[in-house]
Image (cartoon, grey):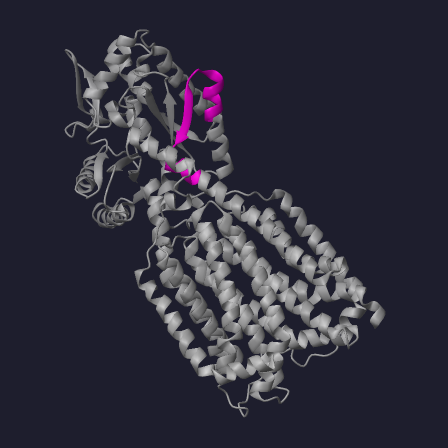
Amino acid sequence: MRRYINFLESYKYILVISLTIITAFFAIAIKDIAFDGSYRVWFNKESKIIKDYDNFRDMFGNDETFIIAFKDKNSIFNKKAINLIKSLTNECVKLDGVKRVDSILNFKTLLLNNGIKRVNIIDEDNFFISKKRALKNKIVTSTLLSKDAKTTLIVVSLVDKSKNKELNVDIFNKLKNLKQKYEKSSGYKIYISGVPSVTASLVSVAKSDAIKLMPLAVICVVLLLAILFRDIIGIIVPSIVIVYTFLIVLGMQLMLGYKLNNFTVNIPAFISAIAIASSLHLYMAWIYYKQKNYGTKEALYFALSKNFTPIAMTSITTAIGFATLAFSKIVPISTLGIAISSGAILAFIFSVTLAPAIILMLKDSYKVKNITFLDFSKISGYGEFIAKNNKKILSIFVILIAILAYGIRYIKVDSNSLNYFAKDTIVRSGSNFLQKNITGSFVYDIVIDSNEVNGIYNPKFVKKILEFEKTIKKSHKEVRNTLSIADLIEDVNKKITSSNKLPNSNMSIKTYINFYKNNSKNFNELVSKDSRYIKITINTNSQETSKDLKLIKFIEDWWSKNSKYKASVEGQTTIFTYMQRDVTKTLVNSILATIAIVTFAMLLLFRDLKLLLLFVLPNIAPIILVAGVMGYMGINIDIGVAISAAVILGIAVDDTIHFFNKFLDAIKTKNFEESIDYVISSSGNAMILTTLILSFTFAIFLISSFMPNVHFAIVTIVALNLALLLDLVLLPALLSLIYKKDW
């Protein structure tokens, strides 16, 4: 270590300058930062889910539609409301990337009067007739108008293909401008919803978090360091390790062509958590020895000698833990795993090269200031307190862990894409409005194979579709509306024959379908070109992913058990459902793998089963305790919560390794009480200040509009502080039982 310190001293300026140049090189790439909220980002190119969805789009066209909605407390059949519908419809038609706009204003219905003809459902000279026509039409009340005639929808369908890769975002922003404009002029409250609004909002929120939260997090760290150390070096050393690490990691990601999304946009936060832990332990150790009147170089020698191994161990275990994510088939998770793993190694390198090089620039006469906030560097008597009260401490923690752990039975690994957003965001408020006033905000597209070309003309096939629609609405209360070509056939038949009974001939069914085909702009969105496949669209209420998966399974099982036809559930809502299931499952599996890997690594290190159990307990217990609290509160494990577990493990393991390293070193020459006092005085400050800084930094995420970030902040803050409590109180109490023979 002496030779290494001498090397650092000789090349300190070269090291600082060269590492700064390298960092600047990677940081240049950040100017090209880009975001992607698309569903495709979650799957690789070979994913069956994506291939099936692409086939579905080739067959039925683009299923991306924005929904504009508003409500008149009396009825929308009045001049003011109709004029608003007309203005919004006309404005949306003009938008680049819009294929079609559907509203009650341009909807046509059948009229029997000396023959059959199609007329506009809205007669602006007679709103009474318009309302009567609309409420009698099942298609209208399933897609465009509430049954009480107070709420109406304007459906904005996007083009099948566009060169604009951010079309959803562009259209969403333009619709927000229209919303603002016409809310002022009309006095109505206008809402925006639809699957594209979810993907657009994901990009919008990710950009907002990157622009606002990341700088705030850095500022928070700097301010806390300034308050705690009241020393420019105390700010520079940890901050430069943090900033240099995440600039290189982020730059590398962008150079490799990856775009940021709501998952990976938090890379700087994770890097900060890892880097602050490594750098603070070294810097606090240097202060500890500097306060004992050692010179700058000598204090650094002791700080590195005592902390190099634990810092290396914590960095390696953290890197290995996050590396388990790299094997995920979900691209953002695998890139996050690689990014954080490389960040852990970089933070270690900077902590033992760049940070010491900066410290070595200081003269021996440099005076460090005492830490006035919870300074444990001169503590004594704590080990004696633990030894005398170990059984009481254990009893308290056993009761606490038992009570909170019981709550795990209520916890669910579940999610919901709409619940990713705060209640006041456009996308969630719009979806809630739809669900409350007219229809479900989730849309599933079911593709039914009639098994032959022109098979949709078979009356038995049409009747089976209608049977299914009635069954699913009856058996699943969350299903609000269903729509298919069968409904249109039924509607035409009823108006022509005044009978609910469908004809039994293929020719009659074909006549009805052709009638609709010749008078509709969206026929090809309901039936395949070869007339073999049809699409059933169902609207459901927003619900947990587990229930969505059960609904999908019910649909597929029903068709396989009750017919000779095949069914598959497609569409972007389905993709989001599978994505949430796979993301959360992958993260949970990664956490379990991380625990197993770290446990095995510690077993090799300690070669003592008792010590291994003591090591594992304070690292797993915080996750168990927080999970129990979540269970009691009814909070499900979503993406944010799952991510927090990885961060919690990383930081908790770091503190425990430092604790054990110092304790096992001290117990060789000191009794138990003195060893505990030494651990707390030499590492207690770093453990406490790391937790404090991270708690305040992660608290920044509480203001995010992306709810997984909010959940991440809450769970991480609570768990990190619990982990600290366990490391400083429970762990010494457990150790006192093992080493009681020495005191």
Q: Quadrant of residue 517?
A: top left
Q: Residue 206: image x %, image y %?
A: 38, 55
Q: Residue 527: image x %, image y %?
A: 29, 23
Q: Which residues are magenta?
A: 555-577
Q: Can you say whether 166 is above or below 60 in the image?
A: below
Relative depth, front residue between 652 and 719: 652
Residue at the image position 41 percent from the left and 36 percent from the top: 49
Residue at the image position 76 percent from the left and 65 percent from the top: 735
Dominant secondary structure (helix, strand or loop) of the stretch shown in magenta: helix
Q: Is residue 301 left or right of residue 224?
A: right
Figure quadrant of the C terminus: bottom right
Q: Is residue 448 left or right of residue 562?
A: left
Relative depth, front residue between 104 and 236: 236
Q: Is residue 294 left or right of residue 267?
A: right
Q: Quadrant of residue 16?
A: bottom left
In this view of the protein, can residue 443 be seen by the observer?
no
- Whether 575 is among the magenta residues is yes
